[in-house]
Image (tube, rainbow, N blue to C red):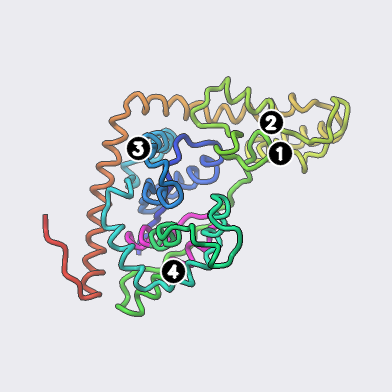
């Protein structure tokens, strides 16, 4: 069986360096070796942010512009909007019939998100009353997204492996009732680099610490020049420790072995200052990201083409999805969807 890969992103707007290094670069490799379905998870965005629904369309265009600028190729992969393929909703409903509720209540990501949103204060069920049905059941929708295309692999980081395991559990549950309809996908583990924001925390738009793919070379330089370094290195002649320097994580990603050795020695001996050290890394970041920003601006200037890309991709996705749903309905003894 040929490798089939499925992955999606919630439409949060412009993407940053962490998205590029952690996800898009893996997609670029996968689209050359596998049949890939990359989708805008707009229904998933509603599970935790119904109040931001009016922003989804614009955020989708901004995000997909970054995909295309990074080199995600509509000729090599199917790019589509989740809500354009209604079969996802149908499969979500049918899979919910074979998914025990405790599987969802125990889901650590649901609880973590709920705490961040102020929905719960503890793991007690009595404290979970503010979690919506959609939020609690989003792992089933996620399973539908993956199983719909008979994915053999799902690119994830280590912390997301439980999502794939739950999808495998749901596939097994369905297959045990109705026969071998679904492939059980495997997690495709990628060594996700640690990408700190300019304040040292994980790079995130919500923290206001991100370097965006849309940033100009001047903006990239300005942001990374003020990036947090070893806090113990207060004065220029204070020696530092690269292992506790947030900026050094980007050196590890972007710099050559000779450059790493140079800045490590310079930091530990105070032979170079922090700004001089960062400038070596900044040059490499700009060399990689600046062309993406230029390509992105060209896509934004032709914004209607982004909609065309998603429209054509959604047609391809619906064709595959309907074939899968035909098998599902037949296995369950349900009526087939009318043609046309």
Tally of numbered discs = 4
| Front in this rendered view, residue 87 or 314 | 87
Residue 332 location, quadrant? bottom left
The secondary structure type at the circle numbered 2 is loop
Mark 2 crowd level (few <14, some 14–19, many ≥20, 10 Å Cα): many
Which comes before the other along the chain, label 4 or label 3?
3
Q: Residue at x 37, y 73 (%)?
A: 98
- Secondary structure beneath disc 4? helix
SS for dot 1: helix
Which residue: 49% across, 28% down? 214
Where 11 sits versus 132, above or below? above
The alpha-carbon separation of the residues under discs 3 and 2 comes to: 32 Å
Q: Rounded to the nearest whole Å, what is the CA distance between mark 3 and mark 1?
A: 35 Å
Q: Are marks 1 and 2 in contact (CB under 8 Å)?
A: yes
Quarter of the image that includes the N terminus: bottom left
The tag on residue 227 is: 2
Q: Earlier in the sequence, mark 4 or mark 2?
A: 4
Crowdedness of circle 4 by 10 Å Cα count: few (<14), some, many (20+)? Answer: many
Q: Nearer the viewer, mark 4 or mark 3?
A: 3
Against 4, is 201 above or below? above
Q: Which residue is mark 4?
A: 168
Residue 57 on the magenta segment: no
Task: Quote the CA–CA distance across marks 4 and 2.
Answer: 41 Å
């Amino acid at each position: 069986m040929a490798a089939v890969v499925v992955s999606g992103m919630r439409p949060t707007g412009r993407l940053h360096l962490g998205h590029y290094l952690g996800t898009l670069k893996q997609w670029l490799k996968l689209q050359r070796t596998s049949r890939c379905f990359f989708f805008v998870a707009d229904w998933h965005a509603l599970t935790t942010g119904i109040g931001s629904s009016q922003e989804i369309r614009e955020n989708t265009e901004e995000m997909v512009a970054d995909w295309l600028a990074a080199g995600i190729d509509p000729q090599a992969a199917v790019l589509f909007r989740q809500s354009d393929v209604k079969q996802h909703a149908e499969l979500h409903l049918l899979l919910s019939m074979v998914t025990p509720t405790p599987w969802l209540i125990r889901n650590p990501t649901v609880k973590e998100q709920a705490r961040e949103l102020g929905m719960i204060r503890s793991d007690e069920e009595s404290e979970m009353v503010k979690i919506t049905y959609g939020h609690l059941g989003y792992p089933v929708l996620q399973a539908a997204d993956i199983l719909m295309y008979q994915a053999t692999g799902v690119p994830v980081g280590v912390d997301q492996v439980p999502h794939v395991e739950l999808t495998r559990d749901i596939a097994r549950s369905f297959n045990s009732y109705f026969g071998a309809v679904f492939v059980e996908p495997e997690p495709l583990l990628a060594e996700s680099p640690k990408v700190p924001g300019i304040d040292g925390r994980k790079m995130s738009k919500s923290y206001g610490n991100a370097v965006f793919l849309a940033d100009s070379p001047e903006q990239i330089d300005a942001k990374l020049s003020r990036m947090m370094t070893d806090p113990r290195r207060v004065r220029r002649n204070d020696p530092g420790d690269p292992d506790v320097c947030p900026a050094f994580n980007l050196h590890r990603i972007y710099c050559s072995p000779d450059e790493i050795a140079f800045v490590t020695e310079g930091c530990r001996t105070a032979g170079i200052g922090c700004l001089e050290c960062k400038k070596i890394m900044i040059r490499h970041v700009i060399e990689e990201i600046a062309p993406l920003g230029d390509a992105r601006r060209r896509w934004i200037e032709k914004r209607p083409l982004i909609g065309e890309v998603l429209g054509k991709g959604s047609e391809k996705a619906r064709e595959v999805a309907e074939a899968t749903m035909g098998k599902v309905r037949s296995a369950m003894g349900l009526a087939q969807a009318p043609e046309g």
